[in-house]
Amino acid sequence: MKSLIKFFSSVRLAIVLLIIITIASIVGTLIPQHRSPAEYLDQYGQLANLLIRFEFTTLYHSWWFLGLLILFSLNILVCTLTRLSPKLRRVFRPSLDFEKKSLLVLKVNKRIKKNKNLDQSHDELKKELTSRHYRIKEKKRDNQVFFSARKRMLGLFGSDLVHLGLLIILLGGIISGVGGFGTILQISKGQILPVPRADFDLRLDKFETEYYPSGAVKDWKSTLTVIEEGKQVLTRIIEVNHPLSYKGYVFYQSSFGWDWKNPTLEIWANKNSDPGFVKKIELKIGEKARLNDDGFEISALHFVPDFVITENNQIATRSLEPNNPAAFIEGWQGEEKIFSGWIFAKFPDVDRIHSSRETDLKLELKGFKGNQYSGIQMSKDPGVNFIWLGCSILMIGLFVAFYWPAKEIKVILEESQGRTELIAGGLAPKNKEAFASEFNSLMTTLGRSK
Amino acid sequence: MTESILFLITFILYILAALFYFGFLFSKKEGTAKTGLSIASVGFIIHTLALILRTFESGHAPFTNMYESLSFLAWSSVFAYVFVEIKYKVRKAGAYLMLIVVAVMAIASSPLMPKEATPLVPALQSYWLWLHVSVTLFGEAFFAVAFITSIMYLVADSREKEGKARKSGLTSERLDSISYRCVAVGFPLFTLGGIVFGMVWAYKAWGSYWSWDPKETWSLITWFVFALYLHTRIVMGWKGRRSAFVAIIGFLAAMFTYFGVNYLITGLHSYV
């Protein structure tokens, strides 16, 4: 046990672990994370199996990375605790039993001989230190007075607060990792969706996209209603950067998309022989619409938002974005199919229509309306409060450590034959240069009044 | 339009300041360096006006694309330098720092950088943009000064060892201590702006405070390097050469987080 504590109390270990964790983190940004095995095989060949086996492909969630973080946490904990009690003693029970020698080895130190007696020197020193906002403890012994003058001593605990904050953050991270859960919900207008792992439902009342005059997206807004046991509990508009929080579940506006299952198409029929003729038809997939009085009908069978022909000659959609919308239509005269094929919204002059006989018709896909759905990132993260607590403590610690540096001056006044010798030494672990100049100016003042 | 004129005037003033500082390296006359400082300060004030104008013209924070954020980095670096110069009188460092500032301004004004203010994508419309970016860049500006003084330390140290340099004025020991002071100012700022504010914003916008996105990871790596710097120095008593090397690596990591990640690795954080 003792040797284990000794092992973990080493700063050298902390440095080594920090270097290893840093290198591992770098490696994780060089190897793409969370891809499919095929992609790794493609990129790394033989090496891929090894990378996957040792979890380099999910590095930050791997057992060995977690292990490093746990070792590091233990290291921080033991390092902080073993250094805490001497520090507490130093701050709250300052020792006045020091010797001349120990003062003269401090980084800043000074010896001054004064033609004053002990009491005069004592009062003068006390006045100077107090005017510089030092708090003083003193002890008299024979012909000597021992001074301990200190200020901003809480600054010494800055680093401990930083370490405490870090530990709480790491704890919060583990809690998030174990108990956290998130997914993307796709919800269309009017739809009621049960929230996974929760006892309430969510309804999308309204979804709108706001645009800048240039046409770029400004914002997405979803009006959400929480429904619990059949009752509407609350309605809130969420937008990017303004999530809805309910019972520890948080809902973020993250994206939007198109639902192309049942779009409404607008098709214009023109006649080659009569440029003035145009007939506008609106129809849904599977519907038939009459074109004119002689019984000619057209129907729409399929719609794809982003038409593409795959390698094996299949029609597919490249994405759900309406980049190249196309509709598969058929033309019927009674029971006889006259033509069938694809027409394209963006390429009205191109078509892939096979006709059984010549027609005078030209069909154009003029409009298409799908349902927009809202993409809502849902997450439940029980660790997040630990994270904010840890971050706050960490920041307080950092600012205390660097902007509120502790300063300590120890002085021995020694009288012999009516003269006093002043021996002083100073300590400031964080702010040596500024402290040295403060110390020197104090010593100059004291030295002047011999 | 006025913003670009002010930017140009700033650019010219920074070049002049750099020239005066370089003049000081040769003339060794205090006055030359002081003129450099005055010109840089005037440039800084005009630059501030340019940034304020930009904010009013575009209606959003002046660091949402590469041009804007480079300009802001130059501005915060000049601020950090003027601060350090007034406090520690590190005159010589001005030459190198202003050189870097001029280079950053030159990249910002190159025709490859689109300069028109574009409307913000939804994810960037948040006051966290102000907090996250400005505090981070201020921290990095102090790292930049630490970087310069660390390099100057390495040069001064080897010259002193060869007995070429006089052991007075800006000694290697003083440079070492100044570069530590800069890290000590920059580190809390970088932690607050880069890591903590970044986490808060990520949680508000993406629903997760940490996603191991390359930019997040690299800012953590930068943080680790400076944590190493502080621990090796304060606890293990490293000084001088070794410390200077760590500070240099730290600044390079910060710059890689800032630029490199955008161009070399793709991720969530693909704005600037």
Image (tube, coloured by chain):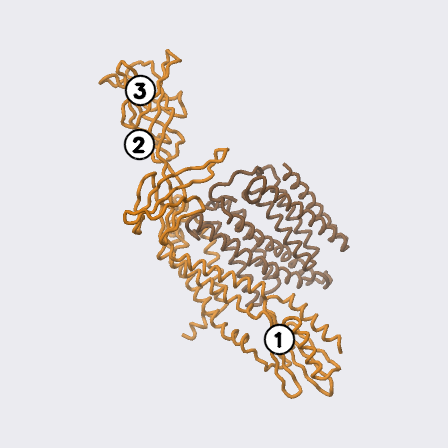
Chain colours: A orange, B brown
Q: Amino acid at mark 1?
A: Ala
Q: Which mark is residue A262?
A: 2
Label 3 in the same subunit as label 2? yes
- Residue A339: name its quadrant: top left
- Identify which residue is drawn at 52% across, 50% down: B257
* Callout 1–callout 2 Cβ contact below 8 Å: no
Q: Is residue A71 left or right of residue A94?
A: left
- Give the vertical position of A68 relative to A154 (above or below): above
Sequence-wise, the earlier of marks 1 and 3 is 1
Q: What residue lies at 63% left-to-right and 85% top-to-bottom?
A: A140
Give the label on residue B227, or none. none
Q: Position of residue A102 (x, y in %)?
A: 62, 79
Residue depth check, mark 3 versus mark 2: number of the one nearer the observer: 2
Circle 1 chain = A
Quarter of the rendering containing residue A114: bottom right
Measure how far apart labels 1 and 2 are at the Cα level: 81 Å
Mark found first going from the N terminus, 3 or 2: 2
Looking at the picture, how far across and down is residue A322, in whole percent? 39, 32
Residue extending furthest toward the top: A273
Secondary structure of the residue carrying tag 1 is strand
Q: Is residue A436 above or below residue A304?
A: below
Reading the image, the residue beneath label 1 is A149
Mark 2 Cα-neighbour bin, 10 Å: few <14, some 14–19, many ≥20:
some
